[in-house]
Image (tube, grey):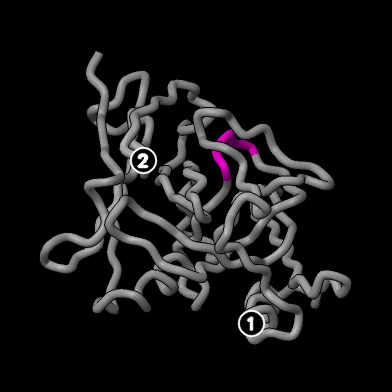
Amino acid sequence: MFSFQGTLHDLGQTGAGAFQFPVFHEKHPCIQASVHIANVQKTWYSFEDDRIHKDRFLMAIGLGTPAFVNLVTIDTGSTLSWVQCRPCPIRCHNQDEEAGRIFDPLQSSTYQSVGCSTEDCGYVHETLGIPFGCNEEQDSCLYSLRYASEEYTAGSLVKDKLTLGNNFSIDDFMFGCSGDDRYNAADAGIIGFGGATYSFFRQVVRHTNYTAFSHCFPGNH
């Protein structure tokens, strides 16, 4: 059986300065039943459970120090990126082992919360159109986000190191640390490709020389 293989440690910024990363989908012409990817430590693992990759485009990201490598769904229609986090105090979806370990902030030396009075907190609340939310005891900015599919996520805004391959990383990547969600998939969460300043692209581009971003997905997925 032929399988598509993409190595994260070979990807990131190319010699010409362009930025690349692998994307996986069940209907990739080279995929039949399984997808193989490499994590940032250059070790191989595979996932064959179609609950993970069915009808979704996925990419692999590393969060924290040391990195928790997670498979996340690419969403071109939303902006906030999020993964579910330990501990999960309310309700979280069943994340498959093959999608990576659930992110644990206490195990990351570079993790930091986003304060309630910060500009980031106010801007996310304003652009998402949600009421102000704050855990005053921990000075932690809260978020909630509901999708048209009736899926939702809620939790704390945080920042940590984002790794894409062994040759590209950025500090202080802002994302949602979800402690309550309804999510109809088995991957770790969502990477937002929208246009606000806290989207994946807008945060990454601040660390490169590029101000343009393009992607192409097949129309028959």
Is residue 28 on the magenta stretch? no
Residue drawn at the location 25% of the way across and 56% of the way down: 20
Could you give the CA–CA distance between mark 2 and mark 1, rounded to whole angstroms? 35 Å
- Residue tagged 1: 123
Give the residue furthest to the top.
1
Taken as a whole, is the magenta stretch helix, strand or loop? loop
The mark found on residue 138 in the picture is none
Residue type pointed to by label 2: Gln
Give the residue furthest to the front.
109
Disc 2 or 1, which lies upstream in sequence? Answer: 2
Give the residue furthest to the right.
137
Residue drawn at the location 54% of the way across and 51% of the way down: 190
Foreground residue, 149 or 127?
127
- The image quarter containing residue 48 is top left
Provide the residue span drawn in magenta.
184-188
Foreground residue, 11 or 104?
104
* Figure label count: 2
Label 2 sits on a secondary structure element that is loop
Alpha-carbon neighbours of circle 1 within 10 Å: few (<14), some, or many (≥20)?
Answer: some
- Residue tagged 2: 41
